[in-house]
Image: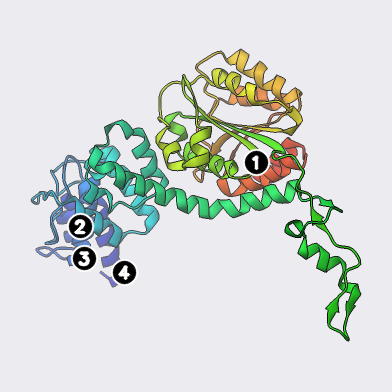
Amino acid sequence: MTTPDQEHVKRWRLILGEAAEEKLSGLAGASGSSLLDKEAALLDDALAFIYGGAGGEAGSSGGGSSSGAAGSAPGGRSAGHGKSSPNLAKWLGDVRTFFPPDIVSVIQTDAVERKGLTRLLFEPELLSQVKPDIGMVATLMSLRGQIPERTKETARELVRQVVDEIMKRLEQDIRRAVIGALNRRRHSPLPSLSGLDWNKTIRKNLKHYDSERKLLLPEKVYFFDRAQKSKDWTIILDIDQSGSMASSVIYASIIGAIFATMPSLETRVVAFDTEVVDLTEQSAHDPIDMLFGIQLGGGTNINKSIAYCESFITEPKKTIFLLISDLLEGGNQAQMLRRLKTMHDAGVKTVCLLALSDDGTPAYDALVAGKLSGYGIPCFGCTPDRLPELIEGALKGMDMKQLADRITGGNRSY
């Protein structure tokens, strides 16, 4: 066989596991010798641990034999018969060595879900080696009541890394969108050095520059008006805590925390399942506390949550209501629809985000989404990076359905 063919056989060996070694060796004409070199054997151990059947601990280091109990795994991969070694720390290191960060995240999640490896989350030494990502934060949130005291600080640090990364990614664009839309800095003739608008004063008086004396002689000086009201708009994020909405819950909560730091916005952050939890205070102080105040999973009562949020709407035409939900209502669906229609008809900028995540739109109630769309309330999945554009357009008074079409490229759900 040619060299490329040998490489293909090795790849199939890694996919199918040690049970396929003998047959593949015969195809490759390599009977009696391993198809895997030392590095590939380490990779095989790491894969066999999660995808090789009934094994319970991380594999042994090297030697060419896969670790874990024999058996079939989903996708056809079989485990080897080698000795199992309870070395999760080494396994985590091997995974990070062999795979890019996005694949590491998938494998870590599979380790918890397929093998029940809550040890990854319950031992500080192991948890500190986990790659922080949204999936792992969602897992920590769902297990928050089970995390032992000795691990809580490590868990919080992992969550903080993810929150800081998302903040860094989104905060500047959100602030720019809000400030640009509101243009709050009106000018006043009242003199005040602390309120002097240097940029506008210089820009407007450049024609009065005296080149001989090298002086700018302003004809008019501009000042900022400090006597304006502190809050221009109200933004309400009503967040569905269903397990399928995990990534959306995390993004929405962090974005709510960004809104809460902006003096021009009155921000309310509410989460719900069958009960309603007001997270506004936590969002204004510590988004980590806010995330640990959310319990993923459980039933859904959207109507109850909307009823709670209605009390915060004092100026409908100066309010944005973002319902982040798959619309799978377990409460009074007819009343929920009436509440949303009434809200929209009163002038509230009302949008249903079926997802606020990088993963696409999850399963949702298409019938409910269609009815809301008929009322003029767009329902669509939105990536976090496009949310600033949505908020800016809403603040500028754009038609929400046209705005939704622009954000989704005309491919919105409803």
Q: CA distance from mark 2 to mark 3?
A: 19 Å
Left or right: where 139 falls relative to 246: left
Residue 281: x, y in percent? 51, 34
Q: Residue type at mark 3: give it.
A: Glu
Q: Quadrant of residue 371?
A: top right
Disc nearer the start of the sequence (1/3): 3
Kind of residue at disc 2: Leu
What residue sits right under mark 1 in the picture?
Answer: 411
Crowding around mark 4 (Cα neighbors within 10 Å: few <14, some 14 to 19, many 20+) is: few
Colouring chosen for the image of the structure? rainbow
Mark 4 — residue? 4
Q: What residue is drawn where x is 62% and y is 26%?
A: 369
Q: Position of residue 263 (x, y in %)?
A: 65, 43
In depth, the one of 362 and 66 nearer the eye is 362
Going by the image, does 390 lie left or right of 347?
Answer: left
- Residue extending furthest bottom? 212
